[in-house]
Structures are given as C-alpha cells and as structure tokens.
Image (cartoon, rainbow, N blue to C red):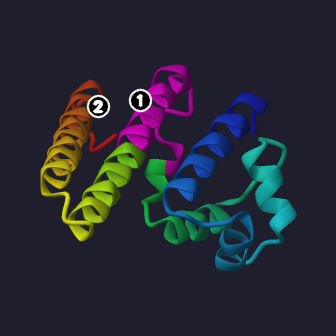
Amino acid sequence: MHDGLLLALGQRVRLLRAERGLTQRELAEAIGLARTSVTNLEAGRQEIGLPVLLRLAAALGVTPGVLVDGLGGSTPAVMPWLELAHAVTAAERQHRAAADRAWDEHRYNDAIRERATADGLHEARELHARVVAAANGGGGRG
C-alpha cells in the first residue's frame, strides 16, 4: 500500500476512534491487534489486510467503504470534509452537555441558548452530509 494511502487511512481511523471515545487499547482489543499495531496504523506505518479492515470497520461502527472511500487519489479533498464533520459533531456534543448542565442549574435561558446552538450544529452536519454525498455522486454520507 502506498505511504500516502496508509497515512490517510490512519488519520481517518484516528478521527473515527476519537469521535467514538475509544482509546487505542480499546480499539486494539476490539479488532484483535496489539495497541502498538493501532498506533502504527494511525501513524501510517502499518499495512492491514481485508480481515483486519473488516474488523476495524465493525469496531468503529462504519462500513469498510467509509474507511477507504476517496483514499485512491482524492484524499486531500476528502479529509478536510471528514475533519469538519468531526469538529461539528464534537462542538454539538459540547453544547448539548452545556445545555444539560445549565438546565440542572436552573439557568433556563442559557440552557435554551445552548440547545439552539447544538440544534444548529446538528442541522449544519446534516447539510454537510448532503453536500458531500452530492459531491461524491450521491454515494452516501460524508
């Protein structure tokens, strides 16, 4: 596998793992590899075969296509989209958590404002998925 492809795959795995709140050790246990193998995979230093790719996709809750889509040449255009989606998802979670805290503390105006921000981020993420799907010829979510 080409070094650039390995690095792009590793970045995608790292982003998906982080989004799901998994440690490298937890992911390694889920796919039957050593933690150092996951470290090397995420750094683009380790090739993987199809059986590991399938276990990796299952452990991350995605299809194998999500892991490899666009890695054959359009990676520079794909990765910023993926990073944006992950950033928006993380921000949405933070605002939802802030809304919950504000509600628990009886700061209802703050809770409503945080919830509205989270809802707006959710809508932005949905729009992002539609744009990426259209850019990919309707082939699914980004």
- Which residue occupies the extreme front position in the image? 106
Please determine whether, in this image, residue 19 is positioned above or below residue 30.
Answer: above
Circle 1 — which element?
A: helix
Residue 81 numbered tag? 1
**Viewer-nearest residue: 61 or 120:** 120
Magenta stretch encompasses residue 86: yes
Are circles 2 and 1 on residues that touch, CB within 8 Å?
yes
Quarter residue 136 falls in: top left
Quarter residue 108 falls in: bottom left
> From the viewer's perspective, is 122 left or right of 21?
left
C-alpha distance separating marks 2 and 1: 8 Å
Q: Position of residue 95 (x, y in %)?
A: 31, 49
How many other residues sit within 10 Å of disc 1, few (<14), some (14-19) or many (≥20)? some
Please determine whether, in this image, residue 21 is positioned above or below residue 1.
Answer: below
Image quarter (top left, top right, bottom left or bottom right) of the C terminus: top left
Magenta residues span 67-88
**Viewer-nearest residue: 8 or 94:** 94
Magenta stretch encompasses residue 6: no
Q: How many marks are shown on the rendered structure?
A: 2
